[in-house]
Structure formats: structure tokens, C-alpha cells
Amino acid sequence: MDSQLIVFALAALAHENRLAVFRLLVQAGPAGLPAGTISSEIGISPASMSFHLKDLVRADLIAQRHEGRKIFYSARFETMNAVVGYLTENCCGGNPCVSVRAPIYKTDPIQREIKVIGDTPS
């Protein structure tokens, strides 16, 4: 994927409402959602929603289709996968990527403290 297209996609996602819209549409799957439902779920006005949807369409992160009087929007998974692929293409300086192991925590109810009890499996 062209680096300029990556910049457009990342810029479009660099806003709290647009990121929320994109995540909602990813969860909705290929069927997508109508604009009114997206606006209600995100909690912003239809006019503001229209502005954000236009930016996501322009970045090729979502697609729109008309069904009667409604406009449905859906995530473009191929673009999302291309962006993720681009970002991880040369990770770790060309060496095989090693997973980072996060510690597992357990709360001790008697001592009221959190203790590290091991690493998460990779």
C-alpha cells in the first residue's frame, strides 16, 4: 500500500469520533449499519456524523451503499488489513517479531495488594 494512502487512513482514524465509528463498523461486519444508527450509537449529531463518515470514505476505510432512502456504511476490511500489514511489514528491524510477555496479576484480598504471579503465555 502506498505510504500516502497510509497517511490518509491514519489521519482519518486520528479523531475520537471517527475511530469510534470505524470500530463500530468493524464490529457490525460486512452488512454495515445505516448512518442514523451510527449517529445514535456514537452519540453525535447527524450533521457531524456526515462530516466524519465523509473523511472515512475518502480514506477508503469505509464504503457506502444506498438501500432505498437509507445509506449504509461498512468497514473496508481490505484497507484495514493493508494498513496493519504496512505498519508491521518491517517491524523489529527486519528480524522475526518476538511477542512481548505481559505479567499476570492477582489481587490478594487479605493484603489488598496486587502481586505479579507470572508471565502470560505467548
Image (spheres, grey):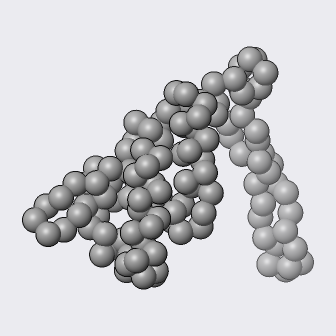
Q: Tell me residue 94's x, y (percent).
A: 74, 17
Q: Is residue 46 above or below residue 18?
A: below
Q: Nearer the viewer, residue 6 or 100?
A: 6
Q: Quadrant of residue 50?
A: bottom left
Q: Tell me residue 122's x, y (percent).
A: 67, 36
Q: Nearer the viewer, residue 77 or 11?
A: 11
Q: Is residue 40 above or below residue 107?
A: below
Residue drawn at point x = 89 percent, y = 78 percent: 111
Q: Tell me residue 5's x, y (percent).
A: 54, 36
Tell whether 98 sits left or right of 84: right
Tell whether 109 sits left or right of 17: right
Residue 41 seen from this side: no
Tell whether 34 sits left or right of 18: left
Tell whether 93 sits left or right of 90: right
Q: Tell me residue 121's x, y (percent).
A: 68, 40
Residue drawn at point x = 84 percent, y = 68 percent: 114
Residue 88 seen from this side: yes
Label count reads 0
Residue drawn at point x = 86 percent, y = 79 percent: 112
